[in-house]
Amino acid sequence: MNTDLLQALCEADAVSGDEQEVRDILNGTLKPHADDISFDGLGSFIARKGSQGPKVALIGHMDEVGFMITHITGQGFIRFDTIGSWWSQSMLNHRVTLRTRSGHKIPGVIGSVAPHALSDKQKNQPISVDEMFVDIGARSHEEAIRRGVAPGDFISPASSFDRWGEDKIVAKSLDNRVGCALMAELFMQVKNPQITLYGVGSVEEEVGLRGAQTSAGHILPDVAIVLDTAVAGDVPGIDAVKYPLKLGFGPGVMLFDKRYFPNQKLVTALQESASRCNAALQFSIMKTGATDGGRYNVVGGGRPVVALCLPTRYLHANNSMISVKDYEAAYAMLFELLMSLNKEKVAGFTQFC
């Protein structure tokens, strides 16, 4: 694992619709290894290596869940709305970063009322997003404006990147900077002259898989491998039957989600690759969400797609957790799979009779 790369990606602020910081990191990292760098009309990053054989795309979405400024009060407090899916109880009193149109960053905190000022009834009632605000220490609307704050600016969670023990990484936006890091490492290391390899950093996944649709149309790949995260069910309070993934037991193949089914022959090929390199593999489903596979699998008449997801604790919050073992297992099996692909094998994925 290239920890430095993952840390840089996680520490970048890139809410859906404002992915420039991650785009810059991927461009700087992959440009020396790519034959071509291009972008779709929404700004998805697309690197290409090779020009012969079937087109194989690795896709990780660049965006993270966050917020957008909707109003500045007379006292200088910031009202906001969510971008992507949040649970309100995971938001209060967390530090955030406002990114202005000029790229300047302003620290803030989602304000909370001290328990001394709450009645017993209020303490037991969750606060709605409409009631929340961000405090940047401004004394007035005019001061906030002078500091560059404006409606439409984006707000990202703020947290440190940490390695806990030998195996765990805790950081913001692991969904899905870990997929971007995995895509980038594989793109740099895989050298298979029998395929044309694409590394994709898609935009706006958290708000409807938009960059998946535009980048898929831009590339029209013959095979798509989506790299993402999925809920780890190995913590108290989660149904481990519905959410069977556990940290440290390998990445999870998404058997279906709200928008996608994997190509069954491609799943078998991934399982065989995992077996050859002795890498652990899990399986999961996601009935209430979707990955970029939901767009790639229907482009151009349909394409073979598989989504491989790292089990992740505390998704869509300021801090999430992954296992380094799962990342390394994902890398090993995907490297093995990508090196095994050729024209005949890829053609076999769509031979249905």
Image (spheres, rainbow, N blue to C red):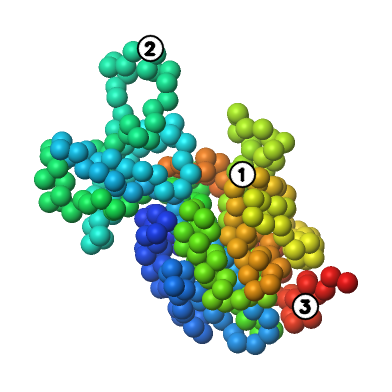
Mark 1 and mark 3 lie on one chain; the one further toward the N terminus is 1
The 10 Å Cα crowd at callout 2, few under 14, some 14 to 19, many 20 or more, is few
Q: Are marks 1 and 2 in contact (CB under 8 Å)?
A: no
Q: Is residue 212 above or below residue 345?
A: above
**Which residue appears farthest toward the bottom when viewing the image?**
52
Q: Position of residue 136 (x, y in %)?
A: 22, 41
What amino acid is found at the position of numbered circle 3 in the picture? Ala
Q: Seen in the image, is 250 located left or right of residue 16?
A: right
The reply to whether callout 1 and callout 3 are in contact (CB within 8 Å) is no
Query: As drawn, is 309 to the left or to the right of 314?
Result: right
Give me the disc on residue 7. Answer: none
Task: Say which of marks 1 and 2 sits in front.
Answer: 1
Q: Residues within 10 Å of mark 1 (few under 14, many from 20)?
A: few
Can you tell which quarter of the image residue 51 is in? bottom right
Q: Name the kind of residue labelled 1 in the image.
A: Thr
Residue identifier under label 2: 120
Residue drawn where x is 72% and y is 49% of the image = 283
Q: CA distance from mark 1 to mark 3?
A: 32 Å
Of labels 1 and 2, earlier in sequence is 2
Q: Are marks 3 and 2 in contact (CB under 8 Å)?
A: no
Q: Nearer the viewer, residue 302 or 310?
A: 302
Nearer the camera: disc 1 or disc 3: 1
Where residue 116 appears, x then y in whole percent?
Answer: 29, 15
User: From what the image shows, is residue 268 above or below residue 220?
Assistant: above
Task: Farthest residue to the top: give it.
Answer: 120
User: What is the secondary structure assignment of the residue under circle 3?
Assistant: helix
Question: Which residue is nearer to you in this view: 52 or 132?
Answer: 132
Q: Position of residue 62 (x, y in %)?
A: 47, 61
Identity, as a three-letter code, of the amino acid under mark 2: Asp
Q: Which residue is mark 1?
A: 288
| Label 3 sits on residue | 347
